[in-house]
């Protein structure tokens, strides 16, 4: 992977960034994504944000090597602290847990007034982002699921709008597995949730054999609910 050829995961993120956007890529690592956008999608201004010194230096080096320092500003800071209010209209965050991405958005809510689109790629717990969207009046407008190097990733795209719009049938199911993904039901979706279902069934069996404390009973009920939803998703292609 480099600034000319992204991984399949980051290429999918790039696909949802509008041409000519002003983008902040949070947790930018090598700054591959903003450099690619500058070279291929007419990025008008970019911020590559990093919280750690090593990745910050790598990003800075790559931006300079590509001759893009006049377009991309490499900044070190935590989450959306690297952005000034009104600077960008699109934010990308990829390669983190969904709960962490949601907390970054929550902690930087004051920086989102000018932002029109969020393109987010959680490694786990996409449900945390879907819930954050609903709580903060962001509408989930598209989703994608893909497998790369034996790992399955989801990409969520949000814009300001009606947060309940995608969940016109079953919100609990949509929050867990994705309202657009459950409609499409592709092979990657089925692979992910079949594996999750088997894992939860193993956990439930272990809990059945454990001491039945209030915590154990609560966990069992939570898992039963998830198992029911996923079985519904996998047996009903028109969920």
Image (cartoon, helix red, strand yellow):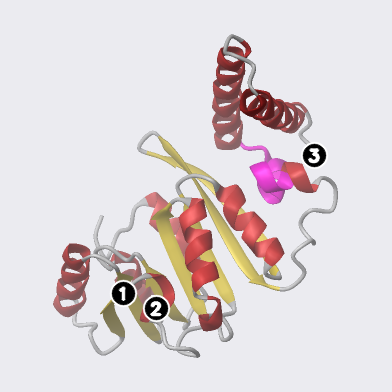
User: Residue 148, relative to residue 212: is it above or below?
Assistant: below
- Helix, strand or loop at label 1? It is loop
Q: Position of residue 114 (x, y in %)?
A: 56, 86
Q: Which residue matches tag 1?
A: 77
**Majority SS type along the magenta span:** helix
User: In front of the other: label 3 or label 1?
Assistant: 1
* Mark number, residue 135: none
Q: Which residue matches tag 3?
A: 239
Dot 3 alpha-carbon crowd within 10 angstroms: few under 14, some 14 to 19, many 20 or more: some
Residues shaded magenta: 174-186
Residue drawn at x 80%, y 38% as measured from the top left: 238
Q: Which residue matches tag 2?
A: 81
The answer to whether the residue labelled 2 contacts the one labelled 3, judged by CB atoms less than 8 Å apart, is: no
User: Residue 230, relative to residue 90: is it above or below?
Assistant: above
Q: Judge left or right: residue 236 versus residue 99.
A: right
Q: Position of residue 70 (x, y in %)?
A: 26, 90
Q: Judge left or right: residue 30 versus residue 184.
A: left
The answer to whether residue 16 of the structure is visible from this angle is no
- Quarter of the image where the C terminus is located: top right
Q: Judge left or right: residue 33 versus residue 112.
A: left
Q: Judge left or right: residue 39 versus residue 196.
A: left
Residue at the top extreme? 209
The answer to whether the residue labelled 3 contacts the one labelled 1, judged by CB atoms less than 8 Å apart, is: no
Dot 2 alpha-carbon crowd within 10 angstroms: few under 14, some 14 to 19, many 20 or more: some
Q: Position of residue 176 (x, y in %)?
A: 66, 43
- Helix, strand or loop at label 2? It is helix
């Amino acid at each position: 992977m480099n600034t000319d050829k992204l991984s399949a995961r980051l290429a999918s993120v790039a696909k949802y960034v509008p041409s000519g956007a002003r983008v902040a890529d949070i947790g930018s690592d090598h700054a591959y994504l903003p450099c690619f956008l500058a070279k291929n999608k007419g990025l008008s201004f970019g911020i590559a944000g990093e919280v750690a010194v090593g990745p910050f230096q790598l990003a800075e080096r790559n931006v300079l090597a590509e001759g893009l320092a006049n377009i991309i500003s490499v900044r070190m800071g935590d989450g959306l602290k690297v952005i000034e209010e009104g600077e960008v209209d699109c934010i990308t965050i990829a390669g983190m847990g969904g709960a962490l991405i949601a907390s970054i958005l929550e902690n930087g809510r004051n920086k989102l007034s000018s932002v029109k689109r969020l393109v987010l790629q959680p490694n786990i717990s996409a449900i945390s982002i879907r819930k954050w969207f609903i709580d903060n009046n962001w509408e989930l407008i598209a989703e994608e699921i893909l497998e790369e190097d034996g790992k399955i990733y989801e990409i969520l795209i949000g814009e300001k709008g009606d947060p309940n719009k995608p969940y016109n049938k079953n919100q609990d199911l949509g929050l867990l597995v994705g309202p657009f993904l459950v409609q499409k039901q592709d092979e990657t979706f089925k692979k992910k949730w079949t594996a999750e279902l088997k894992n939860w069934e193993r956990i439930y069996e272990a809990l059945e054999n454990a001491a039945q404390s209030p915590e154990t009973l609560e966990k069992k009920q939570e898992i039963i609910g998830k198992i029911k939803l996923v079985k519904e998703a996998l047996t009903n292609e028109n969920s």
